[in-house]
Image: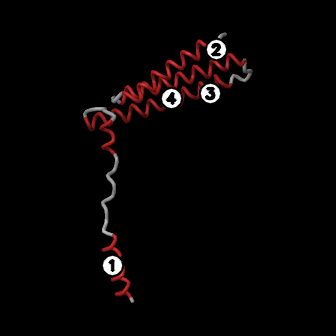
Amino acid sequence: MHLVYPAVLAALLFSIGLYGVLARRNAVLVLISVELMLNAVNLNLVAFDVWLRDTLRAGQSLTLFTIAIAAAEIGIGLAIVLQVYRNRAGSDVDELRDLAEPPPAPTDTAADAEADADKAEAAA
């Protein structure tokens, strides 16, 4: 078997997935693009496993593990996307940045230092 054909197909799938992750704004399409990238990796694992004639079939075993992890990732990712869609009425990735906690309010350190000094003098 020629290794070039699956390698080129995997590179094409990975490139399409990478474009989808970087260019899309819809969270569901980003998850689908991540799945394309994982499938490209799986294709490479199986192709190299067959090409190297591995007796342990380590590439195929790792592929099954990757498929299980990808299924769990999609299940959790879709649950998060659905919850965000219910709360925000949209699944735009740029709007998800608004979910981060705001930075703490700046405090006046000079006033805090004076208050600490006053408390220390009162205690002494």
Q: Which mark is residue 3?
A: 2
SS class of the residue under badge 1? Answer: helix
Q: Which class describes the residues within 10 Å of circle 3: few (<14), some (14-19), or many (20+)? A: some
Q: Nearer the viewer, residue 74 or 47?
A: 47
Residue type, label 4: Ala
Residue occupied by mark 1: 114
Looking at marks 2 and 4 on the same chain, the residue that comes earlier in the sequence is marked by 2
Residue 82 point in image, percent of width and height: 33, 32
Looking at marks 1 and 4 on the same chain, the residue that comes earlier in the sequence is marked by 4
Q: Which class describes the residues within 10 Å of circle 2: few (<14), some (14-19), or many (20+)? A: few
Residue occupied by mark 3: 62
Q: Which callout, 1 or 3, points to the residue nearer the camera?
A: 1
Which residue is situated farthest in the left direction here?
Answer: 89
Residue type, label 2: Leu
**For residue 26, what is the image quadrant?**
top left
Residue type, label 3: Leu
Q: Which callout, 2 or 4, points to the residue nearer the camera?
A: 2
Q: Which mark is residue 70?
A: 4
Q: Is the Cβ of the residue at disc 4 closer than 8 Å to that at disc 3?
A: no
Residue 1 point in image, percent of width and height: 67, 10
Residue at (41% x, 25% y) in the render: 20
Q: Is residue 22 above or below residue 50?
A: below
